[in-house]
Image (spheres, helix red, strand yellow):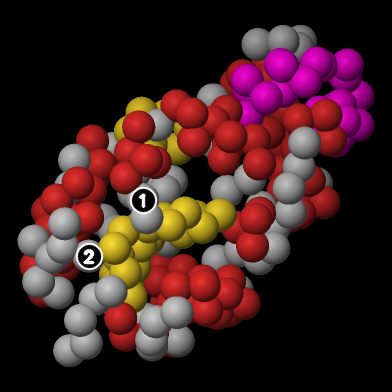
Amino acid sequence: MAKIEWLLFDLGGVLVDVNQDRIFEGLAGYLPESAGTIKELLLSEPQLWEPFVIREFSPRELTCEVNRILGTELSDAQVTTAFNAELGQTIETTAALLPDLKRRTQVGCLSNTNSIHWDRLLVAYDFMSCFDRRFASQLLGSAKPDRLLYDKVLGLLGVQPDQVLFFDDKAENIAAAQQLGWNARVYRDHETLQRDLAVFGLA
């Protein structure tokens, strides 16, 4: 077994509690429409969500798209606040492991995210300072499980696939990484994470 040179974590569902419904509930707080109606309208527009994770969006650009879809006149601050409501509390059981893991290997994050959330993550979540490298889909121009993203990350790290250990809560993202030779495991809970880390001598 190759020595693990890089340990990478997804963010949402692994280090941060996320719930997309909080976006629609947040927007409903400003509008007469229900959260369910807003959800249906916004999720029916792939041209909003698909580019959102593979290129940088300004708050103004996001607000214009949301207002176009909903037929509203929401402000940038209202839309940004509602979208950031998706990000919840730190998953402390995972975050607490990071300082010790950094003493054992290099640690980074690899997340499908967006410009709005990324700005929030960098200022509001202390664990983000623990990472040696931070990889975000909108900055790399591709998203998991697209092979292009994994290839870009591997090239930037300058290591072989079997020198990376990656945790993500979505099985399809793990399967894609495994197909490329990465050591990758689905994050299910803290106990499973610790057992998986131990297999690679990191716990």
Which residue in the protein does label 2 denote? Answer: 105
Quadrant where the C terminus sits is bottom left
Closer-to-camera residue (133/189): 133
Query: Amino acid under label 1?
Result: Phe
Give the residue drawn at x 91%, y 24%: 71
Residue 145: name its quadrant: bottom right
Give the residue drawn at x 57%, y 74%: 152
Does residue 134 appear to the left or right of 91 in the view shown?
Answer: right
Residue 137 part of the magenta segment: no
Quadrant where the N terminus sits is bottom left
Give the residue drawn at x 51%, y 58%: 135
Which range is magenta?
A: 62-83
Which residue in the protein does label 1 denote? Answer: 131
Residue 18 horizontal/vertical position (percent): 45, 37
Q: How many marks?
A: 2
Q: Does residue 52 lie above or below 162 as drawn?
A: above
